[in-house]
Amino acid sequence: MAIENLIPAPAPNDLMPLQAVCDLLAQTGHPASVSTIRRWIADEDLPTVRRRSAGGWRRDEVSYSDILMAHRDWVEAKAVNEP
């Protein structure tokens, strides 16, 4: 009997570059910087995909759905801490 691999992998159509995620979150009224998004990735141990662009630059991509959940938790935590 074969055992399936349980390592989570984001759906390819859900992957977005971090700057694009940052730009979309800016439209929500609760913007988050790329460094904040990187912190969420590290804190939540979210899977990322590293790609090389045409110019040879490194580009990290992450599941937008995963970031939206981390963003929700971050906004909620900020609202609880505000007077």
Image (cartoon, helix red, strand yellow):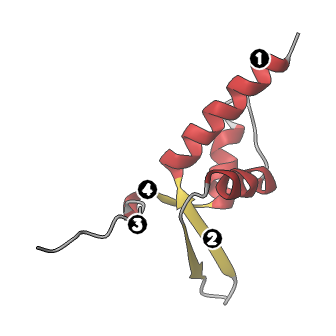
Say which of marks 3 and 1 sits in front: 3
Judged from this view, the residue extending furthest toward the left is 1
- Which residue was labeled with disc 2? 60
Disc 4 marks a residue whose amino acid type is: Asp
Report if the CB atoms under discs 1 and 2 are less than 8 Å apart. no
**From the viewer's perspective, is residue 37 above or below residue 83?**
below
- Tell me the kind of residue under disc 2: Asp
Q: Rounded to the nearest whole Å, what is the CA distance between mark 4 and mark 3? A: 17 Å
The residue where tag 1 is placed is 80
Which quarter of the rendered picture does the N terminus lie within?
bottom left
Labels 2 and 4: the sequence-earlier one: 4
Label drawn at residue 20: none
Labels 2 & 4 near each other (Cβ < 8 A): no
Q: Label 1 to label 4, Cα distance in Å?
A: 30 Å
Left or right position of 48 against 9 = right
Residue, disc 3: 7
At horizontal 69% and vertical 52% (from top left) the residue drawn is: 43
Give the labeled residue for mark 4.
14
Residue at image position (58%, 47%) is 67
Q: Quadrant of residue 17?
A: bottom right
Q: Amino acid at mark 1?
A: Val
Name the element at disc 4.
helix
Task: Indicate which label's residue lies in the foreground, 4 or 3.
Answer: 3
Gap between marks 1 and 2 measured at Cα: 31 Å
**Under tag 1, what secondary structure?**
helix
Q: Position of residue 61 (x, y in %)?
A: 57, 66
The residue mark sitting in front, 1 or 4, is: 1
As rendered, which of 5 and 56 lies closer to the eye?
5
Residue at the top extreme?
Answer: 83
65 vs 51, left or right, is left
Mark 1 neighbour class, 10 Å CA radius: few under 14, some 14 to 19, many 20 or more:
few
| First reached walking from the N terminus: tag 1 or tag 4 | 4
